[in-house]
Amino acid sequence: MILSLLILSIQTVYGSDDYDYTQNGKDWPNIHEYCFGKQLQSPINLDNNYTNTNEDDMYFFPKYKPTKVRITKNQTTHRIIPANDSDNFGPLYTVNSWSESVAYGGKIIFFRSEAEHKFNGVQYNLEVQIQHTMLFATISNRSTVSVFFIQDDAAPKNPFLQTVIDNYNKEDFILDLGELITSAFSIQPYYLYAGSFTYPDCTERNSWYIFERPFKAPNSQLSFFYNLYHNTDIFPNGNYRVIQDRKTSAKKVKVFYRKDPYATSQEEQ
């Protein structure tokens, strides 16, 4: 009984492995019932028809720390996780306009090539997803922060991506999410919506924080992730799930959008 519960717990955290990306998730409903017919599936296309201004504004205060990590690899997924299972990448604090604060601990990093979420139909080169669990709480819901990269060969190499690339085949290494998510994110435009994991079993208990402004990185870095997840038997066309059509579902998508707080003042000048 205890072993069964342990296996179930591991699958809840990391998902199932009996799937592939040969059809980028279109065939997953044949394997996992949760990936079909539900109302809050991810990813989605973030367009003007979805967005509502978030009056209950949210600010992000990342306090990530250098963490010893390892990369777990199987035929369908590569994940970066803390080398010590009880550790995390450091806390991420969210504070809303009512001064209510929540602390999250980063637990898993995924790289999606190309990006899973789209902006007005545009698919970026790379999406980095940092999955968090709520600290000091008993509920198991998760929150995922997504940031994006687009190709710009004039851009300098991104230090976070380079650390991952240089150490990808090592048993463990030190990774600092603070090189990617800085304090400047506390005022960045973002989308927030209730969704699901983008891999089986597609569980619908994940809040997505999607940061709008992409980073720039040269092709020498982005091609590393592209080559990992393209032109193989498991990943013929990338390791992203196709966009989920939720506008026709019984429960419409509700997306909050926090605009750039400085945009108005800059436009007036």
Image (cartoon, grey):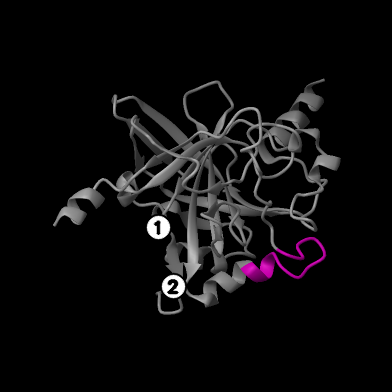
Along the horizontal axis of the image, is 82 left or right of 36?
Answer: left
- Element type at mark 2: loop
Q: Quadrant of residue 215?
A: bottom left
- Element type at mark 1: helix
Callout 1 crowding tier (Cα within 10 Å): few <14, some 14–19, many ≥20: some
- Relative height, residue 9 to residue 153 (above, below): above
Q: Which residue is mark 1?
A: 179
The one nearer the camera, 219 or 91, is 219
Earlier sequence position, callout 2 versus callout 1: 2
Residue lying at 34% horizontally and 29% vertically, measured from the top left = 56
Highlighted range, magenta: 226-237
Q: Position of residue 38 (x, y in %)?
A: 71, 32
Residue 227 part of the magenta segment: yes
Residue lying at 66% horizontally and 44% vertically, measured from the top left = 244
Label 2 is placed on what type of residue? Answer: Lys
The answer to whether marks 2 and 1 mark residues whose Cβ atoms lie closer than 8 Å is no
Instruction: Identify the disc placed on residue 157.
Output: 2
